[in-house]
């Protein structure tokens, strides 16, 4: 059987944390990454609700192709399709 390996970026966040648990329960080998740089002078509750990609765009000359919401939708549909192909979900 082929080993199922997954990289979860943002595993320290709310969705990432649950995604890691979800995948591990289904026998995936999960490598989780969480890199956080917090500005403690700002309210901490906004941490998981904002995404400022300006530094990413500047350093890597890269920017996201779709919105966070669209990315989640695409990712969840892909995960579900992979699980169905493995026979783990009902039709």
Image (cartoon, grey):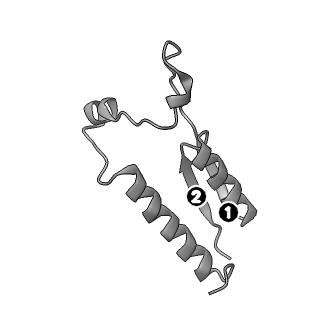
The image quadrant that residue 21 belongs to is bottom right
Viewer-side residue, 62 vs 13: 13
Q: Which residue is mark 2?
A: 6
**What is the residue that sits farthest to the bottom in this orientation?**
91
Residue 87 higher or lower than 28, as above or below: below
Which residue occupies the foreground of this view, 65 or 70? 70
Q: Secondary structure under badge 2?
A: strand
Q: Residue at x 36, y 33 (%)?
A: 52
Residue 86, quarter of the rendered image: bottom right
Q: Is residue 28 left or right of residue 56?
A: right
The count of marks equals 2
User: SS at mark 1?
Assistant: loop
- Residues packed near mark 1 inside 10 Å, few (<14), some (14 to 19) or many (20 plus): some
Q: Position of residue 79 (x, y in %)?
A: 55, 68
Question: At which x and y percent is residue 29?
Answer: 67, 58
Q: Which residue is mark 1?
A: 28
Instruction: Locate residue 64 relative to residue 15 in the image: left or right.
Output: left
Q: Earlier in the sequence, mark 2 or mark 1?
A: 2
Name the quadrant of the N terminus: bottom right
Q: Please give the name of the residue rendered at 68% of the width and 59% of the height, measured from the top-left corner.
A: 22
Q: CA distance from mark 2 to mark 1?
A: 7 Å
Q: Which residue is located at x 64 percent, y 73 percent?
A: 2
Q: Residues within 10 Å of mark 2 (few under 14, many from 20)?
A: some
Look at the picture and state if 31 lies above or below 34: below
Left or right, 50 with respect to 20, comes to left
| Picture residue at 48% right of the left edge, 62% below the top | 75
Relative image position of residue 45 (x, y in whole percent): 55, 29
Residue 57 image position (x, y, % from top left):
28, 36
* Residues marked 2 and 1 touching at CB (< 8 Å): yes
Residue 14: mark in rendering: none
């Amino acid at each position: 059987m082929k080993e199922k390996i997954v990289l979860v970026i943002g595993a320290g966040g709310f969705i990432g944390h649950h995604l890691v648990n979800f995948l591990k329960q289904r026998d995936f080998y999960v490598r989780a990454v969480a890199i956080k740089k917090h500005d403690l002078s700002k309210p901490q509750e906004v941490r998981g609700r904002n995404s400022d990609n300006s530094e990413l765009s500047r350093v890597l000359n890269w920017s996201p192709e779709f919105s966070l919401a669209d990315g989640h939708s695409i990712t969840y549909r892909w995960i579900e399709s992979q699980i169905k192909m493995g026979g783990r979900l009902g039709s």
